[in-house]
Image (cartoon, grey):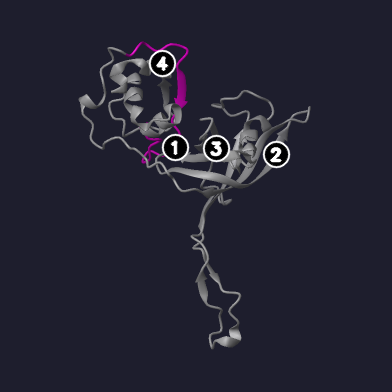
Amino acid sequence: MERVAFLIEKSNMRISCLLNPEDGQDSFVVERTSGAARDALHPLSRSKMTDNPVVFNSRGDTRLTLRLLFDVTLAGSSIQTVDVRHLTSPIWQLAEYVQGMESRSELPRARFIWGRAWDIPVVVESVAERFERFTPEGYPQRSWMTLRLLRLSDELPAAEPPRQFAPADIPETADLPPSDPDWGVHEVIGSSAPDRSGEALWQIAFENYGDPSLWRLLARANDIDNPASLEAGTLLKIPPLSVLRSRKWTQ
């Protein structure tokens, strides 16, 4: 099992869950349609071809089908509950239209994040859920969710940190106060395989601050010498935005 996450763009809410891409149950499927179609208005009798001609219909779609696991008994959940529906309800809300810009209804945008390889904007096309392990009171404790997503155009290009790092890239700690209980904690998601790393530091900065360039703050706060290599499962300290009031961090 590997941890993946959904980041809801408007609220910056993070939803974590488990994905097993090797269980043989179509847990992770990517489907691309080209947008080509047969011309139904072109009768076969007008042509010697046996097939209707292929015409351009649209730009097509990229669809992701995921089979996700939610379980209240697994460690690492940000919500402590006996009812797994408390964990999955935010996913269901992604399929509900909300009031958007210019008084138009729109689906909530989210980002699907899996290690370094996947960080793409999506909307939910459909969701289905199967419950298991019911308590005597009737609360389900485990859920298998089938989620179908449609990829969106990413209007904000990824801002990765430079590949080569020098000490000057990460500021000194003179203006960084010591950590305290008010600081948040972020678990790096991704594969636990030894040849694969977890999320990039710029991704985590974008999730928590909305600004990928603030990866330097996270690097210094967590004594990270090589921000290009983060192991899945690492717990990072997340300083609050008030730390950024120092002029040194905003230059």
Res. 138 visible in picture: yes
- Mark 2 or mark 3: which comes first in sequence? 3
Query: In this image, 205 relative to 123: left or right?
Result: left
Image point (68%, 26%), residue name: 82
What is the x, y in percent for residue 75? 56, 26
Q: Residues within 10 Å of mark 3 (few under 14, many from 20)?
A: some
What is the x, y in percent for residue 110? 52, 39
The disc label shown at residue 131, or none:
2
Whether tag 1 and tag 4 are in contact, CB under 8 A, the answer is: no
Circle 1: residue type? Gly
Res. 239 visible in picture: no
Residue 108 is inside the magenta segment: no
Whether tag 2 and tag 1 are in contact, CB under 8 A, the answer is: no
Q: Secondary structure at mark 4?
A: helix
What is the x, y in percent for residue 219? 33, 24
Residue 181 is inside the magenta segment: yes
Q: Residues within 10 Å of mark 4 (few under 14, many from 20)?
A: few
What is the x, y in percent for residue 19? 54, 41
- Mark 2 or mark 1: which comes first in sequence? 2
Q: CA distance from mark 2 to mark 1?
A: 25 Å
Circle 4: residue type? Ser
Whether tag 2 and tag 3 are in contact, CB under 8 A, the answer is: no
Name the residue carrying label 3. Answer: 18
Name the residue carrying label 1. Answer: 190
> What stretch of residues is rendered in magenta?
176-201
Name the residue carrying label 4. Answer: 242
- Mark 3 or mark 4: which comes first in sequence? 3
Query: In this image, 58 relative to 73: left or right?
Result: left
